[in-house]
Amino acid sequence: MSHTLPRVQNFVGGKPADSVSRCWVTKTDSATSRPIFELPRSNEADIDAAVVAARQALSGPWGAMGITARAALLDRIADAIAENRDELAALESQDTGKPIALARRVDIARAESNFRFFAGALRHEERPCHPMDGHLNYTHRRPAGVCGLITPWNLPLYLLSWKVAPALAMGNTVVCKPSELTPRTASALARLAHAAGLPAGVLNVVHGLGPEAGAPLTAHPDVDLVSFTGGTATGRHVAAAAAPQFKKLSLELGGKNATIVFDDADLDAAVAGACRAAFTNQGQICLCGSRILVARALHDRFVAALVDRAAALRIGDPADPATELGALVSHAHREKVEGYIALAREEGGTIATGGQRPALPAPHDQGAFLAPTVITGLPIDARCATEEIFGPVVTVHPFDTEEEAVAMANAVRYGLAGSVWTRDLARAHRVAQAVESGMIWVNCWLVRDLRVPFGGMKHSGVGREGGRWSLDFYSEPRNICVAL
């Protein structure tokens, strides 16, 4: 592709840098199919340079910076995000294909909140102190060291800030490898953080492909901690590279989350919640409720209402503030999702609505758009009901008893999230505790308090982040015992 396209650069040691390879990857706008920029095709040499810069920064001014100064710096980064929210939202929308209104309301707002939250957590943390006869024990934290942070394309700045903010709060340095599909807000964050006063080498960003840049980062002998968010298959490779070196490791992986609707649920609220859980961000969120389990007595009415609601969602130009569903992240990903819709038909499913590419005016007629799709009639063990599709596709299944609903919810290898819709408070507690997942919402979805643990069970991940769990993960808590 012509070098006249704008180019994104790495950010290493406090300044922009091209890759050692001098090779580039072209990024195409998924909403129009037009090439929009190039990014570096970085390799092991670029990762090594970033890790060296991060290691050196640990012993510089950053290493001597106290809690109060670090917290103030996190707040200044949050201020910079707030001041540049429109630019960041536009970049996020164009990189991902998501509606700009969603990017502004959720992604950029949450990135700002992440930095403010961990600034406050740092200021108000209480560390244990255990007196003994003649001795005093207290907990001291030291940074984990150089952190390798790998983030996906669905919530780029949202998830990057979820890792960067607590890592910096605990005094670490970081090397970030964002998705090659959505790189620009990571570069923007590095630039804004540096302008806010973050010392050189503390926050480094290296762009490129997973096998060429991500794999060397997770395997690098001078990286002390790895936090990865992405697919389960890639997570296995990350774990295999990090575990033999005894790195601290957090894996937030895939999900096939159940939305469980009992016959006593508020139908309107449950339909609205299930629709939001299924199709927000074009269904490209690991927490999306892509399986809906509905009490048989309510099933037909629920499906009819869900179909009406899904069919009414406004699809179109991501830059239009009125758009509710934008493009999928790439044409290749849309083809993958369409492959699952075709498979659902083969497996005996009925497409109740959607399943096709919407008719849109130019230039969006060339974009990776897909209508929100509701599938009924599938066996609960069908591939489309058990494998992560990660698109605007939801399957609906009837159940007869509470025990059957729980068994159906647990009959997948994933265990990330889910929701329960019922007016029966005792049932809500029973089912929420019985479902094998790291997070359950009752009569709501995606309500996030940053103090609570975030993470999955089974094939959905290893470890927990959020609140004190993040402070523990991004530091080495040590006991010091003093004789009095």
Image (cartoon, rainbow, N blue to C red):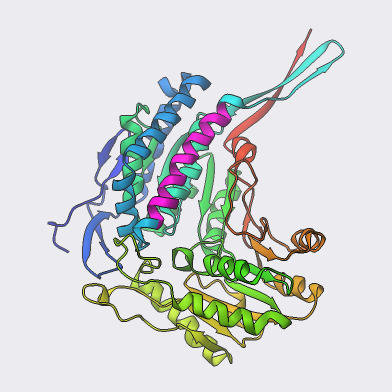
68 or 143: which is nearer to us?
Answer: 68
Quarter occupied by residue 54: top left
Where residue 482 sits, quadrant-wise, is: top right
- Placement of the N terminus among the 4 image quadrants: bottom left
User: What percent of the width, then of the height, locates residue 34?
Assistant: 21, 67
Q: Residue drawn 70% across and 69% down?
A: 265
Residue most extreme to the top = 484
Note whether 205 is above or below 339 in the view shown.
above
Residue 217, visible in the rendered structure: no
Relative placement, left or right, of 441 versus 229 is right
Q: Quadrant of the C terminus?
A: top right
Was residue 186 drawn as part of the magenta stretch in this picture?
no
Q: What stretch is highlighted in magenta?
A: 102-122
- Relative to 199, residue 38 above or below: below
Q: Residue at x 78, y 76 (%)?
A: 404
In depth, the one of 263 and 465 nearer the eye is 263
Residue at left offset 34%, top offset 48%: 185
- What secondary structure predominates along the stretch shown in magenta? helix
The spot of residue 148 in percent (x, y) is 47, 44
Q: Is residue 109 above or below residue 307?
A: above
